[in-house]
Image (cartoon, rainbow, N blue to C red):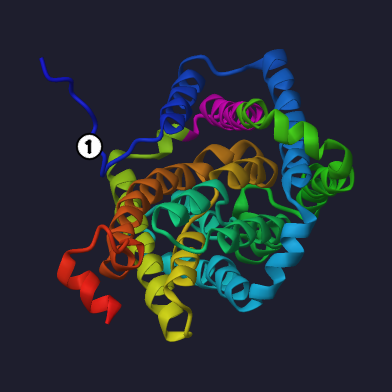
Amino acid sequence: MKRLAWPSWMPIDPYIVLLLATVGLAALLPARGTAADAVSWASTAAIAFLFFLYGARLSTREALDGLRHWRLHVTVLACTFVVFPLLGTAARGLVPVLLDQPLYQGLLFLTLVPSTIQSSIAFTSIARGNVPVAICAGSFSSLVGIVVTPLLAATLLGSSGGGFSAHSLTEIVLQLLVPFLAGQVLRRWLGGFITRHKKVLGLVDRCSILLVVYTAFSEGVVRGIWHQVSPLRLGGLLVVEAVLLAVMLLLTWYGAKALGFGREDRIAIQFAGSKKSLASGLPMAGVLFGAHASLAVLPLMLFHQMQLMVCAVIAKRRARDPEVREETETPAARPPAAAASRDR
């Protein structure tokens, strides 16, 4: 029998399956009492360690070299921390028609988090874009987001953000920024170890995020938050997020062209400027929203999978653009007439 396989144009990230399974575990077996305190403490430690690893991985030399492409980085940062939040603010008009207030707050938070690193690099590479620039753009976005995301949350969400306050901002600095800077300081001694154990530390990354998800959703279940979400509201959220992603993909591609960027740079701008980081957003939501984090991160989780599926299709199509095939064709692979024409 022919083996059934998921279509290559619609990839499902196995990690998303694990995230959904973690949500299911939290729904069935939420942590309570002493167990909840232990899980909360472990989640806090995992977040700090996660950002320590981010700091230890970011090469200072790569960051400095990337400053040469400052126009591109400013464009990506503007898309991530200016255009996205403006669209998120405009979506307030959809309440209560498509979204209720808690889901809107989660959607607005989604527009405030940094861009991705790994998937932006991967899709830029597949599409034959400027990979070194994509690395720097994602790294800069993550670094800037540690400071800018909580400040934007304070401005746009305020007290309605589920407990955001000056104390939350202090926690962000102590729990995220301080470990990140510590990782940067210790990178010269840890760089070799991180390179040798990249896969193991990547697993630690993902397990840390799963723990954060379990903690957030477990608190939500105990407090009865999930009774506030209806399937109709979730459907409305998916529609809004699909429109948001489409707008950003079009804006980053054609906007970069209008700004005079070449094809390879436009690819990097599109993938880095239109995506949001689940890895950075989940820990930040846990600090900023506390017990309300479960609803706050739901829009981000849905958007994350949506952007992976859509960008995978776009990256493969970009790789098949006529100008790319023409550049990569060798004289031996060209038809005789084309090769002779080129020789002339």
Residue 282, x across and y down, in percent: 59, 41
Residue 89, x across and y down, in percent: 49, 68
Range of residues picked out in magenta: 204-225
| 227 sits left or right of 187 in the view | left
Q: Residues within 10 Å of mark 1 (few under 14, many from 20)?
A: few
Residue 314 in view in this figure: yes
- Please state the total of marks drawn on the protein image: 1
Outermost left residue: 1
Name the kind of residue labelled 1 in the image.
Pro
Residue at the image point whose x is 22% and y is 78% from the top: 341
Of the pair 40 and 121, the residue shown nearer to us: 121
| 130 sits left or right of 313 in the view | right
Q: Is residue 222 magenta?
A: yes
In the rendered image, which quarter is residue 175 located in? top right
| 242 sits left or right of 33 in the view | left
Q: Secondary structure at mark 1?
A: loop
Residue 76, x across and y down, in percent: 56, 69
Residue at the image point whose x is 36% and y is 48% from the top: 306
